[in-house]
Image (tube, rainbow, N blue to C red):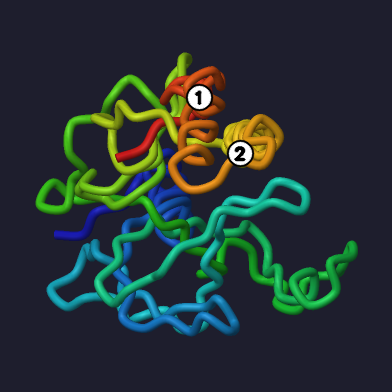
């Protein structure tokens, strides 16, 4: 028995067919990575079919950049990424950095770039803290930034690091005490010289841990 679809059904089927080729964002897994070109071979990790989609070659990996600053890291095999897709072929713009005509006129092709940071549940990060952290994914080594201080090593750091100027000032005080002992000695020798040195050192202002410490940076 034949069936004649309505115009509404025809239009809906046409829209569905067209949208099937529109890609926005998909999870991927890195199969290989070239740190020189910062491009990767990436396997799309979702498929509407029985077999996986063929891996994408030469996918640019995007790291955060802020003017002359950047945050970069390794991209190992198996790294999970978010695959974003340009609406129009960006290849000429990528080569020149200027306003360019697309090399391929088709819209919504697989013009992908990868952003590290996607995570399936088996690869989820530990519970996220309330402070800003930069370090290993498992949290064993971190630079921790809180409203009060910067902690080096991990969040348990309590010992303020020494600063160069404060240590130099403490050493200068020690040298001044030695110089004063030489003056006080006034020709004494042996035990007399040692006594003069001790007297000068006893009257010197000695540095404490806090007098040489930074006020915002702790380490372990």
Left or right: where 91 falls relative to 119: right
Checking the image for residue 121, the label placed there is none
* The C terminus, quarter of image: top left
* The N terminus, quarter of image: bottom left
Helix, strand or loop for disc 1? helix
Mark 1, residue position:
199
* Residue drawn at the location 24% of the way across and 54% of the way down: 3
Q: Does residue 13 sit above or below 174 in this rendering?
A: below
Mark 2, residue position:
178
Q: Residue furthest right?
A: 99
Tags 1 and 2 touching, CB below 8 Å:
no
Helix, strand or loop for disc 2? helix
Q: Give the Cα distance between marks 1 and 2.
A: 10 Å
Q: Nearer the viewer, mark 1 or mark 2?
A: 1
* Residue drawn at the location 46% of the way across and 57% of the way down: 115
Q: Does residue 52 sit above or below 200 in this rendering?
A: below
* Residue drawn at the location 58% of the way across and 36% of the way down: 174
Of the image marks 1 and 2, the number of the one nearer the N terminus: 2
Q: Does residue 10 sit above or below 112 in this rendering?
A: above
Q: Position of residue 106 (x, y in %)?
A: 65, 70
Q: Hey, which quadrant is residue 139 in on the image? A: top left
Q: Hey, which quadrant is residue 70 in on the image? A: bottom right
Q: Position of residue 155 (x, y in %)?
A: 28, 30
| Of the pair 39 and 140, the residue shown nearer to us | 140
Q: How many marks?
A: 2
* Residue drawn at the location 70% of the way across and 77% of the way down: 104
| Of the pair 204 and 136, the residue shown nearer to us | 204
Q: Position of residue 73 (x, y in %)?
A: 45, 63
Count neighbours of disc 2 (C-alpha within 10 A) and say few if under 14, some if 14 to 19, many if 20 or more. Answer: some
| Of the pair 15 and 187, the residue shown nearer to us | 187
Q: Does residue 175 sit above or below 132 in this rendering?
A: below
Count neighbours of disc 1 (C-alpha within 10 A) and say few if under 14, some if 14 to 19, many if 20 or more. Answer: some
């Amino acid at each position: 028995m034949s069936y004649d679809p309505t115009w509404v059904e025809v239009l809906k089927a046409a829209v569905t067919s067209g949208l099937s080729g529109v890609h926005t964002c998909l999870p991927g897994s890195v199969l290989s990575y070239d740190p020189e070109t910062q491009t990767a071979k990436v396997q799309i990790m979702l498929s509407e079919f029985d077999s996986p989609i063929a891996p994408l070659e030469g996918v640019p990996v995007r790291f955060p950049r802020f003017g002359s600053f950047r945050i970069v890291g390794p991209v190992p095999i198996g790294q999970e990424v978010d695959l974003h897709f340009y609406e129009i072929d960006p290849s000429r713009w990528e080569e020149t950095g200027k306003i360019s005509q697309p090399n391929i006129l088709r819209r919504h092709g697989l013009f992908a770039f990868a952003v590290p940071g996607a995570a399936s549940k088996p690869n989820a990060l530990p519970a996220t803290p309330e402070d800003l952290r930069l370090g290993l994914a498992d949290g064993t080594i971190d630079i921790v930034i809180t409203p009060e201080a910067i902690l080096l090593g991990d969040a348990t750091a309590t010992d303020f690091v020494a600063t160069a100027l404060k240590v130099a000032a403490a050493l200068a005080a020690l040298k001044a005490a030695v110089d004063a002992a030489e003056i006080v000695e006034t020709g004494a020798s042996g035990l007399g010289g040692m006594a003069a040195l001790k007297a000068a050192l006893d009257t010197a202002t000695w540095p404490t841990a806090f007098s040489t410490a930074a006020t915002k940076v702790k380490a372990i």
